[in-house]
Amino acid sequence: EIVLTQSPGTLSLSPGERATLSCRASQSLSSSYLAWYQQRPGQAPRLLIYVASSRATGIPDRFSGSGSGTDFTLTISRLEPEDFAVYYCQQYGGSPEWTFGQGTKVEIK
Amino acid sequence: EVQLVESGGGLVPPGGSLRLSCVASGFTFSSNWMHWVRQAPGKGLVWVSRINNDGGSITYADYVKGRFTISRDNAKNTLYLQMNSLRAEDTAVYYCARGGHYNFDLWGQGTLVTVSS
C-alpha cells in the first residue's frame, strides 16, 4: 500500500497569509497520479488540483500544486476566508488503488 | 446542472444490509468510471469501490470485499452500493464520486450510514 503522509496536521494562519501544505508518499509516484482536495465543514470534498499541478475547473489561481517523486506541495498564495478548511492529497496506484492522506486542517489564527 | 445525489443511508443494526443509490445528472453517466468513498465521523477519506463505465470491471478495498457490491444502471444514470453484513466500523458518510484522471472530479453531498444496535 502506498501511504501518503500530510504535514502539518494543523496550520494556523491569518487571512492574506501564504499556506504551504506537504504530502509525502511512501514510494515514488507518477505526477499524473497525485491530486488535492478541499473539504469545508459539512460539505463534500472538491477537487482542486490534478496531475500534481493542474487546477480543476473553477479553482482560483491562488491555489497551486507542485512536486514529483515522493514530495508534493499545495500552496495557497493568499488565504481568503473561504479557504479555511481541510485539505487532502490523493494518489492512484498499488493496492488499494486509491489512497488519501490523513488531511491538513487550515484554521484561522 | 452537473451533479450527483446519493440516497439510501440510515440506521441499521450490526449484521444488517443497506442499499445506497447515486443519481447522476448533467453529464454522460455511461462514459465515466464511478466510485464510492466513505468518511467516518471526524475522520479522513477512504476509497471503497469503483466500477468502470460499462460495469465490466470492478474493484473493492479489502475491508469491504465479499460484503459490499457496487453496480450501475446506465439507463437510469444510477450507481448503487449494496452493503451486507454491516459492522460498527462501516459507520460513515458515503460519497459517490465521478472518476476523473486517476482522481475524483465530481462528488455527491453524501449519505450517512450508521451501524448500531
Image (spheres, coloured by chain):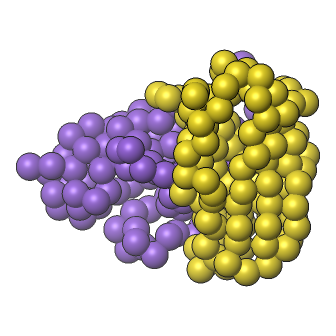
Chain colours: A yellow, B purple
**In the image, residue B5 above or below residue B49:** above
Residue occupying image coordinates x 50% and y 70%: B61
Q: Position of residue A66 (x, y in %)?
A: 88, 54
**In the image, residue B109 above or below residue A104:** above
Q: Position of residue B29 (x, y in %)?
A: 71, 40
Which of the pair B4/B28 is nearer the observer? B4
Residue occupying image coordinates x 55% and y 52%: A9
Instruction: Count every numbered label the image shows and give the total.
Output: 0
Which of the pair A60/A95 is nearer the observer? A60
Q: Report the residue that reaches farthest toward the left.
A: B117
Q: Which quadrant of the figure contains the N terminus of chain A?
A: bottom right
Position of residue A88 in the picture relative to residue A41 (left or right): right
Residue occupying image coordinates x 76% and y 46%: A20
Q: Position of residue B111 (x, y in %)?
A: 41, 36
Q: Look at the image and tell me whether residue A28 can be seen.
A: yes
**In the image, residue A105 above or below residue B47:** above
Position of residue B22 in the picture relative to residue B30 (left or right): left
Residue occupying image coordinates x 67% and y 25%: A14
Q: Position of residue B54 (x, y in %)?
A: 69, 57
When asked about the image quadrant of residue B69, the answer is: bottom left
Q: Look at the image and tell me whether residue B50 can be seen.
A: no
Q: Which quadrant of the figure contains the C terminus of chain A?
A: top right
Position of residue B87 in the picture relative to residue B104 (left or right): left
